[in-house]
Amino acid sequence: MHIRKDEIKGIIIELLTISAYIALSYAATVMIMR
Amino acid sequence: MKKFRLRAYSIEIISYYTGYIILCIAALMIIPVITSLAFREWNPMLDFLISLSISTIAGLALISFGMQTKENKLNVQWKHGFVVASLSWIILTVLCAIPYSLSGHTKSFLDACFDVMSGFTTTGMVLTQDLDHLSNGLQMWRHMLTFIGGQGMIVLALTFLVKETGGAYKFYVGEGKDIELVPNVKGTARIIWKISMVYLIIGTAALWINGMLIGLKPASAFIHALYIFESSWSTGGFAPMTQNIMYYHSVSYETVAMVLFILGSFNFGLHYAMWIGKKKEIIKNIETQSFFITSFVACVLALAGLAKLNVYPNVMSGFRRVVFNVLSAHTTTGLGSIYARQFALEWGDFGIMIMTAVMLIGGSACSTAGGFKGLRVGVVFKGLIMDVKKLLSSERNLKVYKFHHIKEHILDDGLVKASALIICCYTAMFAIGTILGTYYGYPLSSAAFESASVTGNVGLTIGVTTPSMPAVLKVYYAIAMYLGRLEFLSVFALIGYVVGGMKKLCLNTLKD
């Protein structure tokens, strides 16, 4: 299985976007439950 | 006579391709056989060998019955695609339930079929008893079922086994996946499997390292990582232990699982677009927009509701119990970080209502997720705005409304109507399930929660789904999972085909 450079970039962006979204959800939890 | 011959041809085509699919899945039983052999589990190995033999015989019998298809190169029509897809799922559920039943971990064969349907449809409801002491072979099998079911077993079978792929797209659509990433089905299916395999390596490695850091032995950490990846990526919800994700007692393990099930709930078309360099697609796409908005609003509402009830004492416990479960429900995964009865006893009606709503909305179309799907919710919402704008603008204003999903699409009434129709089918299914639940004496909120969970292929339970629940409810839940996963059309085609055939047979008999 061969993975191109573009594909690795795509994977990193997907992972970063979802991580950012989870971080945002955590921030919302802090705001509400503090 | 000609009509009768045409129907016979149809039966032969259906039989031939169904046989192929059964043969393909039967071949996959070799993996649990090898697993059982590796762990020296002789009885489970024998169970799988018996199931493998029965499935192979059934597959070969169906292929030989429909051999005319190959010899005369009969053309596959849309109706055949739909009927093969829906029929294969039923036959495979029965055949794949044999090792469950032989293992002695299920109360009845119905329970075994329920668990297989739950796995195939990536629901994750469990009726198998004593999960913690299941053989390694059967654990491998149940997680494989959910992984294959998520990607699409008919796609797997037809693209790797059948040489002539002219009609393959018809089977492919029949299984609820109607995207064409590249002009041919074989290429599209291979891309789907490539995306899944790449994330299998990344996700399993991340969970494996995490597992070792929290104290699991390397071999055990690897097996657990593989199972939790398969479950998360397929938005399935199965876990190797009764305590589900709570077994690991780790916020990092739960966070990695969360990233994986959100990824799994995204459209394969979106992954492909990102991989070929369309980096803004994840923000522009109507489905991801719909998911990010609805899931964030649901998290905030559930957090606010539970904060008011003072259920969770601190931020971390609120995040791990509320955000994790809401996202697990929204992506239709079903991994749970609290016990089933805690929903009923601690979350209150407001929390249950939020969970019910997100379970019905579900993930993306052409992904491993269930529910209405973000695409349909987005299209109906935009359609509503379009209608309001049309009402407010002058009659001569013929503006074209568009939405972005991989590329720009024109929003027309037909598309809005088709999306609304499927949403209506899901809602009706949910309503019937809720009524049935209350008929058997469960509280309204519990019946609605469980019904939304099976209709949306989620798998979270509030305590209704147990081996002791009424058999009628088990059958209905299995049907709801099946209809929800195949998105109604294929199953309606199968029912129409069988009823139409019987009607013609009766009329011919009466004429004679």
Image (cartoon, coloured by chain):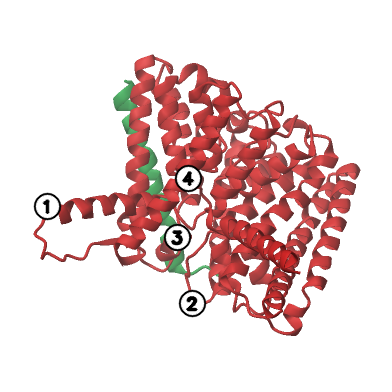
Which chain did the renderer colour red? B
Q: Which residue shows up at 78% across the image and 36% down it?
A: B134
Tags 1 and 4 on a common chain = yes
Locate residue B193: give its quadrant: bottom right
Q: Earlier in the sequence, mark 4 or mark 3?
A: 3
Label 2 to label 4, Cα distance in Å?
A: 31 Å
Looking at the rendered structure, the kind of residue marked 2 is Pro
Q: Residue furthest left?
A: B394
Label 3 to label 2, Cα distance in Å?
A: 17 Å
Nearer to us of marks 2 and 1 is 1
Tags 2 and 1 on a common chain = yes
Instruction: Name the residue that disc number 1 marks.
Output: B392
Q: Secondary structure at mark 4?
A: helix
Instruction: Name the residue that disc number 3 marks.
Output: B271
Nearer to us of marks 2 and 4 is 4
- Name the disc covering residue B183, or none: 2
Q: Along the line of sight, which residue is nearer the eye, A33 or B47?
A: B47
* Mark 2 chain: B
Tags 4 and 3 on a common chain = yes
- Name the disc covering residue B426, or none: 4
Q: Earlier in the sequence, mark 3 or mark 1?
A: 3
